[in-house]
Image (cartoon, rainbow, N blue to C red):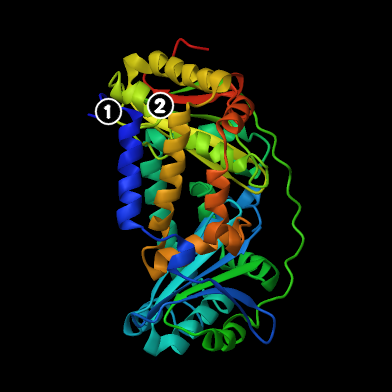
Amino acid sequence: MFSGLPLKFFQILFGFVAFFIFPFTPLQAFDIQTVTSKKGIQAWLVEDHQVPIFSLAVGFSGTDSDPSSKLGLANFTMSMLTEAAGSSPYLEFQEKLDNLAIESSSSAGRDNVVIQIRGLSKFRGETFDVLNKILLLPRFDQTDIERNQRQYQAYFRRQQEDPGNIAAENWNQLLFPDHPYGNPSYGNNQSILGLTAADMKKFVASNFTLENIKIVVVGDITAAELATLLDQTFGSLPSKKPAAPHQQSIPGQAGIFHIPLDVSQTTIVFGQSGFDRKDPDYVTGYLLNEIMGGGGLFSSRLMRKIRVERGLTYGVSTSFFPLDYASVLSGSFATAAKHTDEVIALVRGEWQEMAKNGPTAEELELAKVHMIGSFPLRFESTWSTAASLLSLQMNGFSKEYIMGGRQKLIEGVTLKDAKRVANRLFQPDRLLFTVVGPTPPQSK
């Protein structure tokens, strides 16, 4: 529906939105303090006393990869972590959370785990005490394990028939054939049924340590109050994390791989390796991803070429994200089976064009406007602000980067930089496609 609109329109539109909705940068909007407790535990704090609530996000980086015999251990452990703790079994613990108006969540990534808590100021002490019990005394009762195992079994049954999941899992296996990143993060039916309370308690004891902890608190709490609560809540965690060797990841195959499935549409996952977050070209690479397909924006090249101009998909997007031992530039979309070869050729063509000529000046400027203007959307509430700051902190970014350094880096990328990095990043001969659908593509 935007096929007739020039790039300049999107540039003006995003600039308008960014100016009127977010007239101030994060630097002007709030201050990130570093709070250090008597025991030396540090946390980032953003004070906001307008509403009597606060949110807390805790992350543990460098978590162990699942053993090959216990795939899905990290995810399963984190799915159960906030269900019961201390002396309170499941129903009693959940009732306690309700009575204190505490919201909680926990999740596992490939290299880290995250716990989030939101509570009322008047129950601040009780809320931090609940978190202390979750971290130090999770229960993992057998009845709860079995209930969650049944839920995972239902999930696996659904995923076995989901083309997107099949394509993504196969893509990971092919890109990382000899590394834990190639394993399904949720495990499989057999591995989940074999998990025990002892496995989960060992995972918690090994990974929840002061050595690899990051803490962010946002909301109605002062630095002095937080400093005391940090020691009370986290002071009893183990200080050191046991050494866990990791294998450096080497990207695997390139080419096109077909997984037959009797469905009306073909689902495709594609991509290649990207840049490490410490790479000096990382920010430029992120901008180039925005131009190619970031966020599925209608202004991106793949959306314009595949959807707007030809109507071959409802949406196509790409993501550029680093892991501890690899970095990935990947995308996905679905199309009618008869168009499979055509869309693969279009993706390869855009990859080749970007590698050869890089972006235009208009595309680069639009990507900058969008990346800068959309950044404040991450800080809409205490919950989202805590989560976003924790993610940035765990990815190695400083307060200075968040409060203005990021914007300066983006603004400093020149067209010459972008063209050079595009030639380095986009490598058509390294593209890997997994195609899930009724007929195999003719392309090779």
Q: Is residue 69 above or below residue 306?
A: below
Q: Nearer the viewer, residue 440 or 369?
A: 369
Q: In the displayed structure, does residue 77 sit left or right of residue 19?
A: right
Where is residue 244, by image quadrant?
bottom right
Q: In the displayed structure, does residue 328 sit left or right of residue 211?
A: left
Q: Identify the residue at horizontal 56%, vertical 24% (top origin).
A: 431
Does residue 232 appear in the picture of this structure? yes
Q: Nearer the viewer, residue 186 or 297?
A: 297
- Image coordinates of residue 378 in percent, x first then y, are 42, 58
Q: In the displayed structure, does residue 12 sit left or right of residue 30?
A: left
- Image coordinates of residue 325 in percent, x first then y, are 67, 45
Q: Amino acid at mark 2?
A: Leu
The residue indicated by pointer 1 is 5
The residue indicated by pointer 2 is 302
Does residue 182 appear in the picture of this structure? no
Q: Quadrant of the N terminus?
A: top left
Q: Residues within 10 Å of mark 1 (few under 14, many from 20)?
A: few
The answer to whether the residue labelled 2 contacts the one labelled 1, judged by CB atoms less than 8 Å apart, is no
Q: Identify the residue at horizontal 35%, vertical 51% (top origin).
A: 18
